[in-house]
Amino acid sequence: MGVSHPNLKRSSVPLLGALALLLLSAAAPGSVDQAPAPLPYPAGLSMPWRLLNIDSAEAARTRPALNASAKALAASWLTAPDLVTKSLTRTKPTHNNQRRTDQIQAGQPKAAVGVPSVTVEPSWCSIMNRHLFFVTVTDSKLNTVLGSAHTAIPRGDWAKLRTKEQMTNFLTSKLEDLATKAIAKATIKPKVATDAMHLGLTLGKEVTRIDEGSSWCLNQLLEEQLAPEHTVVRSLGHDHLGLLRDLLGQPAALKRPTRMLLLDWMHDGEATFKPEVPVKFTVTGALLESVYGKHVHDDYQGNILGRDGAAATVELTGPGYDSLVSLVKAEEKTLQLAEWPQVVKRDRAWVYLDRGRAWGLKMNDRLLAEVDGETVKGHVVHFYGPEAKLKSPRGFPVEEGAVLFIRLNQKLPRVGTTFRFDPRTFPTKYPP
């Protein structure tokens, strides 16, 4: 039979629980282990090569040159680069993770880009009879594309580079030039977005013939062309950046797309087809909103031409490309940050707004509006998708919006009423 502690009520906690609480309360301050403080992101991160559907035998032949050129790339844009593993003093990486972090160089960028931490990654892929080598600059916290540049070389010319020295010299000279161009693009790219459109690209299917290259390569080329004027969330790179985020103890901040383009790249399937550039693609796809994963528009289809561009590059062009860019720009207009949520519909004490989570609203956000000299107050209690079949007063169909419960002056809101964030913070001083 247990003995009750005289200072504990019988109904408060079980005996074992009470004893545990007493032991914890008697422990010396600081005896309970606390998670170590987060470490800052290195100002510059230079990643190892990323290969997209490159033949394994070709990759093995080139591996020594790839490793040497990756180190040369880091030295070209970082001051005194060193292994990022040495800075991971918060949590020691596992053996497998250290094999990955030992391939990442960290240091101080020689040129300021305008964000606290930038990542530079080289990648290699193919489009038909062209090898493409990319250098992509991203925000280390968000993985959004700040700048990208590439060079193309015919497969036949690449095959003539047979020795390690020949391949290393070619890759090193190209990477240093591409890094300069990509960083220059990143420097001039506006760092403050005017809309909440974060575009992500993904594939419906991948090609299976090695001589046709990779559909991911086409997506990467499209990212490069869209990045200067749009916020593009890189489809690659999350593996390395997610690992470093966890080892540094940083909160999750990798940008999630608010809109996704799901694309299929198909070429002429006739027996006479030759895997050569220029090549015409029939591109089909769908623009999806990333909250509910529903279609935003009817399926997209267009003809996009892949052809040789200036200075040994490959470019995407044609009426299909123009219509795809127009589709992206039209969707950006539905997520303008300067335009506050407006009422689409009122149902008693609930009003439906034309902005939702993609725009930046969260559950319990407090909003207010001025109607006929009276203040209308409410807070977000729900979100809705395209199944509501509502249309914004601004003219576009609402694919995902928020429902506001009105606490004060429920009958005043009408279609077109604009709500803004309540500037009051809580808890407030009394009297308010």
Image (cartoon, grey):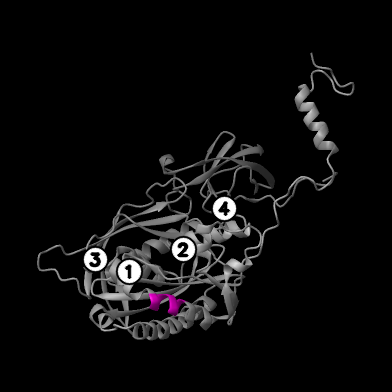
Cα–Cα gap, marks 3 and 2: 23 Å
Q: Amino acid at mark 4?
A: Gly
Q: Residue furthest left?
A: 271
Q: Earlier in the sequence, mark 3 or mark 2?
A: 3
Highlighted range, magenta: 64-70
Q: Viewer-proximal residue, 147 or 108?
A: 108
Of pointers 2 and 1, the one earlier in the residue sequence: 2
Which numbered disc, 3 or 4, marks the residue that appears first in the sequence? 3
Task: Find the distance from the CA under tag 4 to the CA under tag 1.
Answer: 29 Å
For this orientation, the residue located farthest to the right is 6
Q: CA distance from mark 3 to mark 1?
A: 29 Å
> Which secondary structure, mark 1?
helix
Instruction: Locate residue 81, reporting x and y percent.
Output: 57, 77
Q: Nearer the viewer, mark 2 or mark 1?
A: 2
Q: Residue at x 54, y 44 (%)?
A: 402
Taking the image as shown, residue 352 lies to the left or right of residue 220, namely right
**Label 3: how many Cα within 10 Å (few below 14, some 14–19, many 20+):** some
Q: Quadrant of residue 315?
A: bottom left
Residue pointed to by mark 1: 322
Give the residue at mark 3.
210
Whether residue 168 sits left or right of residue 291 in the image: it is: left
The residue that disc 2 covers is 237
Dot 3 falls on a residue whose secondary structure is helix
